Image (cartoon, grey):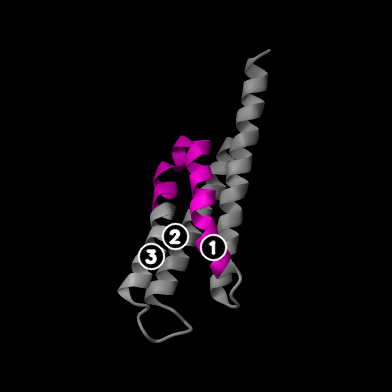
Amino acid sequence: MKEISRVVGFIAGLISMIIWGMFTFFNPYSSDFVGIGTALLTFFLLALLALFIIIFIRVSNQFIMLIAVIWSLPCSLYFALTPGFFAIAGLAWLLYLISLILMTLHKKKYNSVNSI
């Protein structure tokens, strides 16, 4: 279960990075650059978090994943409620949440086995 939570978290991070790159550089809905302010805001809300998750997923720390779930919620919710390709950001947030739940279940299972 621990490896599954890592894979799910890694996939969520990759999805977030892809969405940020598409939104910023290859937006299929606009030929214009989104602007430096928007690019930086979405970088801090999506891409920076995804980089942290991709780099530190081997640690499998529940606290880091909880931060990811809370941190990515506003931007992911905004994108998820829009029609089109960027609604996939909601999937990334859902995968962060699933990874957190799997980590929590693994920790509880591991602690209950070791306490016997």
Q: Which residue is mark 3?
A: 41
Label 3 amino acid?
Leu
Q: Are marks 2 and 3 in contact (CB under 8 Å)?
A: no
Task: Please check the rendered image and state whether residue 77 is part of the magenta-colored stretch, yes or no.
Answer: yes
Question: Which label lies toward us, 2 or 3?
Answer: 3
Pointer 2 or 3: first along the chain? 3
Element type where label 1 sits in the image: helix
Element type where label 2 sits in the image: helix
| Foreground residue among 78 and 98 | 78
Q: Which residue is mark 1?
A: 76
What's the magenta region? 51-78
Label 1 amino acid?
Ser
Q: Residues within 10 Å of mark 2 (few under 14, many from 20)?
A: many
Q: Are marks 1 and 2 in contact (CB under 8 Å)?
A: yes
Q: Which residue is mark 2?
A: 46
Pointer 3 or 1: first along the chain? 3
| Residue 10 seen from this side | no
Figure quadrant of the C terminus: top right
Q: Given the current orientation, which residue lies at the most extreme left position?
A: 36
